Amino acid sequence: MSDRPSVLFVCVHNAGRSQMAAGWLRHLAGDTVEVRSAGSAPAETINPAAVQAMREVGIDITDQTPKLLEYATAESSDVIVTMGCGDTCPVFPGKRYEDWNLDDPAGKGVDAVRPIRDEIRGRVEKLLTALNLATRPEHSPQRPPA
Protein backbone atom coordinates (compact mmCIF):
# COMPACT_ATOMS: atom_id res chain seq x y z
CA MET A 1 0.00 0.00 0.00
CA SER A 2 1.40 3.40 -0.95
CA ASP A 3 1.56 6.51 1.23
CA ARG A 4 -1.81 7.43 -0.25
CA PRO A 5 -3.94 4.28 -0.26
CA SER A 6 -6.91 3.88 -2.57
CA VAL A 7 -10.24 2.71 -1.19
CA LEU A 8 -13.03 1.43 -3.42
CA PHE A 9 -16.60 1.27 -2.10
CA VAL A 10 -18.84 -1.11 -4.06
CA CYS A 11 -22.59 -1.68 -3.92
CA VAL A 12 -25.05 -2.81 -6.54
CA HIS A 13 -26.39 0.53 -7.74
CA ASN A 14 -23.61 2.86 -6.54
CA ALA A 15 -26.37 5.29 -5.62
CA GLY A 16 -26.68 5.15 -1.83
CA ARG A 17 -24.41 3.26 0.57
CA SER A 18 -21.22 3.41 -1.49
CA GLN A 19 -21.76 7.07 -2.35
CA MET A 20 -22.33 7.98 1.31
CA ALA A 21 -19.23 6.00 2.34
CA ALA A 22 -17.14 7.72 -0.33
CA GLY A 23 -18.49 11.10 0.78
CA TRP A 24 -17.58 10.41 4.40
CA LEU A 25 -14.09 9.20 3.51
CA ARG A 26 -13.37 12.18 1.26
CA HIS A 27 -14.56 14.53 3.95
CA LEU A 28 -12.84 12.88 6.92
CA ALA A 29 -9.53 11.96 5.29
CA GLY A 30 -9.09 14.84 2.87
CA ASP A 31 -6.46 14.07 0.26
CA THR A 32 -4.70 11.39 2.34
CA VAL A 33 -6.76 8.68 0.59
CA GLU A 34 -7.81 8.17 -3.01
CA VAL A 35 -11.55 7.53 -2.83
CA ARG A 36 -13.41 5.48 -5.44
CA SER A 37 -16.91 4.06 -5.68
CA ALA A 38 -18.68 1.86 -8.20
CA GLY A 39 -21.56 -0.54 -8.67
CA SER A 40 -22.19 -3.85 -10.38
CA ALA A 41 -25.44 -2.46 -11.89
CA PRO A 42 -25.21 1.33 -11.48
CA ALA A 43 -28.35 3.44 -11.23
CA GLU A 44 -29.01 6.51 -13.35
CA THR A 45 -28.65 8.94 -10.42
CA ILE A 46 -27.71 9.06 -6.76
CA ASN A 47 -30.50 8.33 -4.28
CA PRO A 48 -32.09 11.71 -3.37
CA ALA A 49 -32.59 10.62 0.26
CA ALA A 50 -28.86 9.83 0.51
CA VAL A 51 -28.05 13.25 -0.93
CA GLN A 52 -30.34 14.94 1.60
CA ALA A 53 -29.02 12.91 4.55
CA MET A 54 -25.43 13.77 3.68
CA ARG A 55 -26.27 17.42 3.11
CA GLU A 56 -27.65 17.52 6.67
CA VAL A 57 -24.14 16.82 8.00
CA GLY A 58 -22.43 19.26 5.65
CA ILE A 59 -21.33 16.86 2.91
CA ASP A 60 -22.39 17.50 -0.67
CA ILE A 61 -22.41 14.40 -2.90
CA THR A 62 -24.45 15.93 -5.73
CA ASP A 63 -21.39 16.10 -7.99
CA GLN A 64 -21.03 12.31 -7.95
CA THR A 65 -22.56 9.91 -10.45
CA PRO A 66 -23.07 6.14 -10.24
CA LYS A 67 -20.26 4.31 -12.06
CA LEU A 68 -19.90 0.77 -13.34
CA LEU A 69 -17.47 -1.42 -11.40
CA GLU A 70 -14.56 -2.08 -13.72
CA TYR A 71 -11.98 -4.80 -13.29
CA ALA A 72 -9.06 -2.36 -13.55
CA THR A 73 -10.49 -0.09 -10.85
CA ALA A 74 -10.82 -2.98 -8.41
CA GLU A 75 -7.43 -4.38 -9.33
CA SER A 76 -5.68 -1.07 -8.69
CA SER A 77 -7.42 -0.40 -5.34
CA ASP A 78 -5.66 -1.15 -2.05
CA VAL A 79 -8.87 -1.63 -0.05
CA ILE A 80 -12.19 -2.87 -1.41
CA VAL A 81 -15.28 -2.42 0.73
CA THR A 82 -18.33 -4.29 -0.54
CA MET A 83 -21.89 -3.53 0.45
CA GLY A 84 -24.01 -6.26 -1.03
CA CYS A 85 -22.68 -6.76 -4.55
CA GLY A 86 -22.44 -10.53 -4.16
CA ASP A 87 -20.43 -12.61 -6.58
CA THR A 88 -20.00 -9.76 -9.07
CA CYS A 89 -17.13 -8.29 -7.03
CA PRO A 90 -13.76 -9.47 -8.34
CA VAL A 91 -11.28 -10.88 -5.82
CA PHE A 92 -7.56 -10.11 -6.09
CA PRO A 93 -4.87 -11.68 -3.91
CA GLY A 94 -3.15 -9.26 -1.56
CA LYS A 95 -6.02 -6.78 -1.33
CA ARG A 96 -7.69 -5.81 1.89
CA TYR A 97 -11.40 -6.66 1.73
CA GLU A 98 -14.21 -5.64 4.04
CA ASP A 99 -17.87 -6.52 3.62
CA TRP A 100 -20.18 -4.06 5.31
CA ASN A 101 -23.64 -5.50 5.86
CA LEU A 102 -25.77 -2.36 5.72
CA ASP A 103 -29.44 -1.74 5.01
CA ASP A 104 -30.07 -0.64 1.44
CA PRO A 105 -31.45 2.92 1.35
CA ALA A 106 -33.11 2.34 -2.06
CA GLY A 107 -36.74 3.43 -1.97
CA LYS A 108 -36.51 4.75 1.59
CA GLY A 109 -37.11 8.26 2.85
CA VAL A 110 -34.51 10.39 4.57
CA ASP A 111 -35.73 9.36 8.05
CA ALA A 112 -34.76 5.75 7.24
CA VAL A 113 -31.50 6.78 5.56
CA ARG A 114 -30.11 8.82 8.49
CA PRO A 115 -29.27 5.75 10.65
CA ILE A 116 -27.55 4.14 7.64
CA ARG A 117 -25.56 7.35 7.08
CA ASP A 118 -24.50 7.42 10.73
CA GLU A 119 -23.49 3.74 10.75
CA ILE A 120 -21.42 4.31 7.62
CA ARG A 121 -19.62 7.21 9.30
CA GLY A 122 -18.62 4.96 12.20
CA ARG A 123 -17.34 2.28 9.85
CA VAL A 124 -15.37 4.82 7.80
CA GLU A 125 -13.77 6.15 11.00
CA LYS A 126 -12.79 2.58 11.98
CA LEU A 127 -11.35 2.02 8.50
CA LEU A 128 -9.25 5.17 8.80
CA THR A 129 -7.93 3.92 12.15
CA ALA A 130 -7.15 0.49 10.67
CA LEU A 131 -5.25 2.16 7.82
CA ASN A 132 -3.35 4.28 10.38
CA LEU A 133 -4.82 7.46 8.95
CA ALA A 134 -6.17 9.99 11.38
CA THR A 135 -9.45 11.79 10.88
CA ARG A 136 -8.53 15.33 10.00
CA PRO A 137 -10.33 17.74 12.37
CA GLU A 138 -10.72 20.40 9.70
CA HIS A 139 -12.61 17.87 7.59
CA SER A 140 -14.86 16.55 10.35
CA PRO A 141 -18.44 17.55 9.61
CA GLN A 142 -20.85 18.35 12.33
CA ARG A 143 -22.61 15.47 14.03
CA PRO A 144 -26.32 15.34 13.30
CA PRO A 145 -28.53 16.63 16.10
CA ALA A 146 -29.61 13.93 18.55
Image (cartoon, helix red, strand yellow):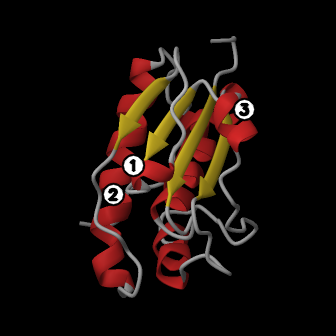
**In the image, residue 57 lies at what x, y percent?**
48, 63
Q: Residue at x 38, y 62 (%)?
A: 117
Q: Which mark is residue 30?
A: none
Q: Earlier in the sequence, mark 2 or mark 3?
A: 3
| Separation (CA) of disc 2 from disc 1 | 5 Å
Quadrant, the C terminus? bottom left
Say which amino acid is labelled 1: Arg
**In the image, residue 64 lies at what x, y percent?**
72, 65
- Around disc 2, counting alpha carbons within 10 Å, would you say few (fewer than 14), some (14 to 19), or many (20 or more)? some
In the displayed structure image, the side of residue 17 where residue 7 appears, left or right: right
- Around disc 1, counting alpha carbons within 10 Å, would you say few (fewer than 14), some (14 to 19), or many (20 or more)? many
In the displayed structure image, the side of residue 27 where residue 130 appears, left or right: left
Q: Residue at x 42, y 50 (%)?
A: 87
Say which amino acid is labelled 3: Asp
In the displayed structure image, the side of residue 64 where residue 123 appears, left or right: left
* C-beta proximity under 8 Å, tags 3 and 1: no
Vertical order, 47 against 100 (above or below): below
Vertical order, 115 against 112 (above or below): above
Q: Which mark is residue 121?
A: 1
Q: Which mark is residue 31?
A: 3
In the displayed structure image, the side of residue 118 where residue 15 appears, left or right: right
Q: Which residue is mark 2?
A: 118
Regarding mark 3 in the picture, which secondary structure is present there? helix
| Separation (CA) of disc 2 from disc 3 | 22 Å
Q: Residue at x 51, y 46 (%)?
A: 89
Residue 40 sits in which quadrant? bottom right
* C-beta proximity under 8 Å, tags 2 and 1: yes
Regarding mark 1 in the picture, which secondary structure is present there? helix
